[in-house]
Image (cartoon, rainbow, N blue to C red):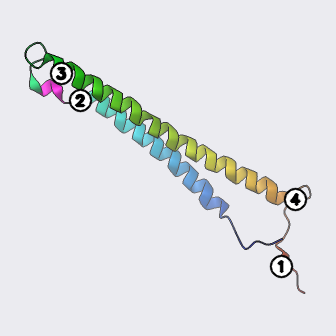
Amino acid sequence: MDSGIEIAGAQVTQHAGLMRRHGEQYSAALRRLQERGYGCQSWGDDTGLFSGLYEEYARCGLFGVEALRSISTFLAETGDGLDTARANIADAEAGPYGPQPPAHAYPV
């Protein structure tokens, strides 16, 4: 049965790769942010008046980076899911007897 819905397999595969690449880039940006620090070093007072605030600010920064790290994982997993969906669709279209031409390909 022809539903009129077509899936551009090559584009799904291409975009799956892009999603994984975005996940890798996002993760790399978070690593650079973590390596750079969270901005409190510029206060120059980690033992005096601002020491309590300094510690909490740094802890919040670390917590934020860890929370954002899950986004990079989600992006990569979305790319993997797109590849899996494309493979499942290709298998379903092939059926037990291989690919079948669309129903409208036969003259009536």
Q: Which residue is mark 2?
A: 38
Quarter of the image that includes the N terminus: bottom right
**Which residue appears at 34% of the width and 32% of the height?**
64
| Label 4–label 3 contact, CB within 8 A | no
Quadrant hosting residue 56: top left
What's the amino acid at mark 4?
Gly
Q: Earlier in the sequence, mark 4 or mark 3?
A: 3
Q: Nearest to the eye among marks 4 and 3: give it.
A: 3
Quadrant hosting residue 108: bottom right
Real-space CA distance between mark 4 and mark 3, rounded to the nearest whole angstrom = 64 Å
Real-space CA distance between mark 1 and mark 3, rounded to the nearest whole angstrom = 70 Å
Q: How would you rate the neighbour count of disc 3 (Cα within 10 Å): few for under 14, some for 14-19, many for 20 or more?
A: many
Disc sitting over residue 67 in the figure: none
What's the amino acid at mark 3?
Tyr
Q: Which residue is mark 4?
A: 98
Real-space CA distance between mark 2 and mark 4, rounded to the nearest whole angstrom = 57 Å
Q: Is residue 56 above or below residue 100?
A: above
Real-space CA distance between mark 1 and mark 4, rounded to the nearest whole angstrom = 16 Å
Q: Judging from the image, what secondary structure is the residue with disc 3 in?
A: helix
Q: Judging from the image, what secondary structure is the residue with disc 2 in?
A: loop
Q: Earlier in the sequence, mark 1 or mark 4?
A: 4
Quadrant hosting residue 97: bottom right
User: For the view shown, which residue lies furthest in the bottom direction?
Assistant: 108
Q: Earlier in the sequence, mark 3 or mark 2?
A: 2
Q: Which residue is mark 3?
A: 54
x and y, in percent, of residue 93 in the image: 80, 60
**Which residue appears at 87% of the width and 57% of the height?**
95
Q: In the rendered structure, which segment of residues is drawn in magenta?
A: 38-42
